[in-house]
Amino acid sequence: MGKNPDKLLTDLQERLNYLTQLGVEYLYLTPVVRSSAPSQRSRFLALEKQIQNCRACPLAETRTYTVPGEGSITAELMFVGEGPGYDEDQQGRPFVGRAGQLLTKIIKAMEFKREDVYITNVVKCRPPDNRNPNIEELEKCQTFLFEQIRFIQPKVIVALGNVPNHFFLKRKVGITSLRGKFYKYMNTQVMPTFHPSYLIRNEKNRQLKRLVWDDMKQVLAFLGKR
């Protein structure tokens, strides 16, 4: 039980009288600062809510769940794919199908955990039949990715496949000639590399896996991990 307010006032008055007798003339009180600004985490959750409620393009009509992304909002490393597939659409999480399992292995080989990095896509809803997102869908969804990058401020973005690289560069250059060379986007270094689904479609081609690992070693070196 708390003290009676009258008793508290009496104790306070006695304490003040005692300090006065000691010659104390001033009391310096530390002000209590209450911030009205929302925390970084709450603002990021608000952004995710916007994504979940978005109906700006026709993909909203065919999706099961939106897939905002997942991971650390203070991550120094971010992975960006093109868009959710069937498994992602069913679970509302990015990269959870076969390609996602391979991406998880790559992340572990880099000595990170999925929760240490941030994983997302350029568009947040599944395009029908897993086709590439079209211009309208990319334009309607691009603000969300801009905001995610601005919030997280990663040191490196790994752009998986043609779609995110075309999106960042605003021009079409084949991933085979792009991969392995950093370029800059919004003050962040971007490493283009093959999409995990491409590796799965060409799983007998070990050279492709070596090339991706070479790209990841460059990322690790840039982050000071190697």
Image: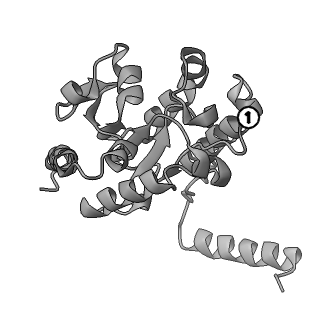
Q: Badge 1 is on which residue?
A: 62
Q: Residue at x 54, y 46 (%)?
A: 69
Give neighbour class at mark 1: few <14, some 14-19, many 20+ (Cα, 10 Å). Answer: few
Q: Is residue 27 left or right of residue 183?
A: right
Of 29 and 225, the residue lying toward us: 225
- Count the labels in the image: 1
* Display colour scheme: one colour
Tell me which amino acid carries mark 1: Thr
Of 160 and 7, the residue lying toward us: 160
Q: Is residue 16 left or right of residue 197?
A: right
Please, which residue is most extreme toward the front here? 204
Q: Residue at x 30, y 39 (%)?
A: 194
Quadrant (top left/top right/bottom left/bottom right) for the N terminus: bottom right
Residue 174 screen position, x and y as percent: 28, 23
Quarter occupied by residue 135: top right
Of 30 and 184, the residue lying toward us: 184
Quarter occupied by residue 62: top right
Quadrant (top left/top right/bottom left/bottom right) for the C terminus: bottom left
Q: Is residue 115 left or right of residue 195?
A: right
Say if 179 sits above or below 41 in the image.
Answer: above
Please, which residue is most extreme toward the top here? 171
Q: Residue at x 72, y 77 (%)?
A: 14
Q: Is residue 79 left or right of residue 10?
A: left
Of 74 and 195, the residue lying toward us: 195
Say if 167 sits above or below 104 in the image.
Answer: above
User: Tag 1, which secondary structure?
Assistant: helix
Residue 112 screen position, x and y as percent: 31, 61
Residue 57 screen position, x and y as percent: 69, 22
- Residue 174 visible? The answer is yes
